[in-house]
Amino acid sequence: MQRAAQIRNFIAENFLFGAADQIRDDASFIDSGIVDSTGVLQLIDFLEETYGIAIANEDATPDNLDSIDKISAYLARRLDGSRKAAPPVLEVAEAGGQS
Amino acid sequence: MNPAPAISADILRIDAACEIERITASIRDMVFRQLSRKGGVVGVSGGIDSAVVASLCAQALGPDRVVALFMPEADSSPESLRLGRLLAEALHVRAVVEDVAPLLKAARCYERRDQAVRLVVPEYGEGYKFKIALPGLMEGERYAIFSVIVQAPDGQTRRVRLSAAAYLGIVAATNFKQRVRKLIEYYHADLLQYAVAGTPNRLEYDQGFFVKNGDGAADFKPIAHLYKSQVYQLAEHLGVPDEIRRRPPTTDTYGLEQSQEEFYFTLPLEKMDLCLYGRNNGLLPEDIAAAASITKEQAERVYKMIDAKRRMARYLHSEPLLVEEIERA
């Protein structure tokens, strides 16, 4: 299955409860209210598991993930390009008391 | 034609004495007339909102008709109980301490929560502390992605992005805390034929910063129309102890201290206050940006976030749905 179709299916099944015709490939998930903050985590989990990549937080931006078209373009850069996957651990802070 | 006057933070100034009079009259009407209850139960957290609600109830109903409930659990700061007692003494209301940790333990709240944390931090265990946090909204165009900040017994901390399963597992387990507290509040309310006071301010009520059927449940919510800065204005006028007024708002839910800003609102509350006011009153992002000392782009992002959180809050506010309308007395 083409990536765009896989993503559309995931969005439809998880956020639109099967109504795939409600989403255009260029529609913003944020502006259309389809994906909330939990939904973003679910979307990232789906992309990481389905495509075997780790998405670092600096990549988890609306520029990369806010529509089916944007995700397809991002995946094309990651999977068809030479970029290496980054681990999900973001930082190690200083030792010490509570922040 | 003269240009419209610039908007400043003063737009949220209220006549505190007048507002207190209005709210206390309303509390009397809601509790005695509309709800037919003999008094009020207030869960007191040691924070500003519950302190103001308890003070308003004591003034409206009389101190002898108000019960202040303190409900510490394993992760509560001892400071919360101390400040709660300080308030109850100042108000001369009956104070009751109910340790809810055994109930939470019986519901496996801590165990379920720790299992969820271990999904992303396998070594998490005895002696560790954690909190969950969002990135600040002021930092740029990015998603509000939750991370867990874990402190090991040796003091080393690290931040790891949560998976959806870990995030939902942590939230579902910790929501036991607010729901168990509400259980205890209604026990005391039933015992005394009192009504339960809810303590959300306008930011929390509007933006869904509450647990459905947990702290979101109440018989009346006397400050739900007030912006956070207005709650502080009332607190000063009501004589809420300085220590409570100066305490930074905290969730008091996780082992590591966690501000409401990092857990939910993602920007300082005084800025959030102004932006919500601007959104509610049809002000342009550039107008509210000047008052809140943020950029126009940041104000636009906050407006978007307000709308997104309102969409999420719809479910939290919704009453049970029925297949058809049923007439009620």
Image (tube, coloured by chain):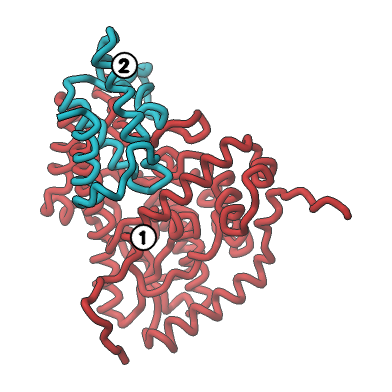
**Which quarter of the rendering shows the N terminus of chain B?**
bottom right
Q: Which mark is residue B279?
A: none
Q: Colour of chain B?
A: red
Q: Residue at x 35, y 70 (%)?
A: B218
- In the figure, residue A83 lies in which quadrant? top left
Residue in front for this viewpoint, B52 or B3: B3
- Give the label, 2 or 1, closer to the camera: 2
Residue sitting at the far top: A82
Q: Would you say the residues marked 2 and 1 are in contact, meaning their CB atoms lie under 8 Å apart?
A: no
- Is residue B324 found left or right of B287 in the rendered image? left
Judging from the image, mark 2 belongs to the subunit labelled A
Neighbourhood count class around disc 2 (C-alpha, 10 Å): few under 14, some 14–19, many 20 upward: few
On screen, residue B141 versus residue B155, left or right, reads right
Under tag 2, what secondary structure? helix
Q: Residue at x 49, y 45 (%)?
A: B304
Residue B213 position, x and y percent, is 27, 63
- Most distant residue in the bottom direction: B329
- Secondary structure at badge 1 equals helix
What is the distance, in whole Å, between disc 2 and disc 1 at their CAs? 37 Å
Q: Residue under circle 1?
A: B314
> Which residue is denoted by mark 2 in the rendering?
A77
Amino acid type of the residue that numbered disc 1 sits on in the rendered structure: Arg
Q: Amino acid at mark 2?
A: Arg
